[in-house]
Image (spheres, rainbow, N blue to C red):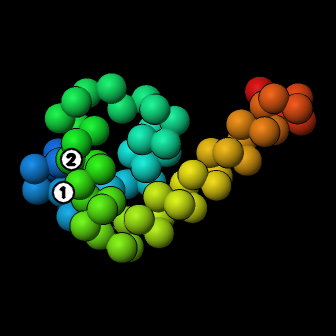
Amino acid sequence: MRILAPRCHYIDMEHISDHDLERYHLGMVVDEAELTTLEEHVLACPKCADRAESAAEYVDMLRVAIVTGNFDL
Ligand SMILES: [Zn+2]
């Protein structure tokens, strides 16, 4: 049986999750401490900086789709 990973928060976070990268790019991270942690991690971690860029592209693509009405909600 697989043991579920504990829901550790940013204090002992290794990398930012895709979900959080998307939230970050969408400006949905409103908590000052969380925002700072995310920004600091992205600045210090090239891997997550890369992923942040991918998330940004993905989010922008979705945004364009929503605006142009090609995205069926
Ligand atoms: Zn990272």
- Of mark 2 and mark 1, the one earlier in the sequence is 1
Residue at screen point 71% across, 37% down: 63
Q: Which residue is mark 2?
A: 37
Please name the amino acid that badge 2 sits on: Thr
Q: Residue furthest front?
A: 43
For the N terminus, the image quarter is bottom left
Residue at screen point 81% across, 38% down: 65
Quadrant location of residue 62?
A: top right
Residue at screen point 36% across, 73% down: 46
For the C terminus, the image quarter is top right
| Percent position of residue 12, x then y | 11, 56
Residue at screen point 47% across, 58% down: 52
Mark 1 and mark 2 in contact (Cβ < 8 Å)? yes
| Percent position of residue 58, x then y | 64, 52
Q: Which residue is mark 1?
A: 13
Task: Look at the picture and state if 22 lies above or below 54.
Answer: above
| C-alpha gap between disc 2 and disc 1 | 10 Å
Q: Residue furthest bottom?
A: 46
Disc 1 is placed on an element classified as loop
